[in-house]
Image (cartoon, helix red, strand yellow):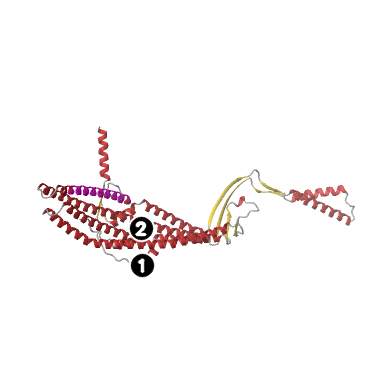
Amino acid sequence: MRPVKIITAFLLIANLATAQSLELSLKESIRTAIANSFTIKKYESRLKTKEAENKKSWGNFLPSVSLEASYTHLNDDLDIDLNPIKDAIVSLEASSQTEIKNIYNILNGLPSMSDAQKSAARNQIAAGLNTLLPPFSMTFKKQDFKTATLAGYQPIFLGGKLLAAKNYASSELKAAEYELLSAKNQLSYKVADAYMQVILLQSIVKTRQSVLDGIRKHKEDARKLYKEGIIAYNNYLRAEVALAEAETNLLNDRNNLELALVNFKQLLNIPQTTEIKFTDSLIYNETEVQINELESEAQSRQPLLNIIREKKIAARQSYNLARSEFLPKLIAFGKYEMYPEYLSSLEPRWAVGLQLNINLFNGFKNYLDLQKASYLESEVEQTMNESVQLINLWITKSYTEANNASERFKKLEADIKLARENLRQNEKRFLNGMGTSLEVVDARLSLEKAELERTAALYNYYKSLAELYYAAGDFEKFFDVWKNQEFSHE
């Protein structure tokens, strides 16, 4: 049994070590969620990737320099043999000199040379020429040789392809920045909604507990009055039924509160064992929102619209890229051989030049790519128009819901006052034996209903405002209305 006790003790210590206690305002909750979010970290990594790609696109404008080295072994030396030409030249020259010598003898009165003498002279002259002339054969590439070539290329004009690639990378970088901002806004809205749901349910549980305490007291009063014979048994039974219903409602809302806490901690990516004290409360703050200003602001600040704008720029650069295939391309190049001793007489030590290339026909593929890029531009443009309409509708919906919730909250104040007075009078009448338990229970439930509706209206008010600023693309402005960070539940 001892190992089991040791393990149990270890688990208990581990649980105590992992348990934490936090006091969180709404702003602090959002900061914590953003810092811990895997989704945000994913978009941050994507942003860094796009930053690297944008920097990489600058390299397309710079020259590329490479060093190429090799070692080669051939089956034999590469030779060139021109000795047959040498033999022909020597033979012709020997014959010519022999004839000249024969003519010289005749002109000087000497006898003409016989064939044997001519043959001997030719052989003698040929032997002399062979001695004077070098061999007409050489090795211009050895069997084993190595090369090391320093080569460089500098694009001069590629039809606008390099500039299109740079602009495309820049638009992708900006789109990644807006995607990160959009993810932060979305997470901020989700955390705000989850935070407000928790404090809403805490308020509901508090109200339910108050109702339960009131009905429990009413049941005790009903039991005393029943024993004294002042009220009928069915009045006492009605109080018992109301108490059971109140206990069930309280249990359900406590369970809902636990689920809301689980969801909230999941959004913040903190351990479920963490104890949290929520320092903000649902307290009504008046605000004046101009829907026209929000719609105008959304045009420039809404990340979703800005992402589409950047995608539109990227589509334009794709069009420019496709168009560049119809234009000539000019590249400067140069190379330098670092092992001149292995070069043949036909190979230069260095060379520089220009290379011009223009495609004349490739099966209409470039033309079809240009059409495709044009259709993509049109598609993004229509997406932009549709998104603007949807954003404006989103803003109008949230604005209307916020106003309705605000009006509902204000009007329910009178209902609550009336319900409290009605409860007070019915309790007084019941204690005097002039009222029924049903009237007391109904009055208390009416007060509970009004209080819960007013709390729900306040939650809907702030939720709609949060969604409104989320739709406008400037969630930080929500905190201009949410000014109760210093308040806590009483």
Mark 1 or 2, nearer chain start: 2
| Numbered circles on residues, count | 2
Q: Position of residue 479 (x, y in %)?
A: 29, 61
Q: Is residue 127 left or right of residue 364?
A: right
| Relative vertical location of residue 9 with respect to residue 252 in this rendering, above or below | above
Q: Position of residue 461 (x, y in %)?
A: 29, 60
Q: Is residue 355 visible?
A: no
Q: Position of residue 56 (x, y in %)?
A: 47, 56
Residue at the top extreme, as displayed? 1
Q: Which residue is mark 1?
A: 292
Please name the predominant secondary structure of the magenta segment in the image.
helix
Q: Which mark is residue 185?
A: 2
Binning the other alpha carbons within 10 Å of mark 1 as few (below 14), some (14 to 19) or many (20 upward) gives: few
Q: What amino acid type is highlighted by mark number 2?
A: Asn
Q: Position of residue 340 (x, y in %)?
A: 60, 52
Q: Is residue 364 visible?
A: yes
Nearer the camera: disc 1 or disc 2: 1
Quadrant of the image occupied by residue 413: bottom left
Quadrant of the image occupied by residue 51: bottom left
Q: Which residues are magenta?
A: 238-266
Q: Is residue 311 magenta?
A: no
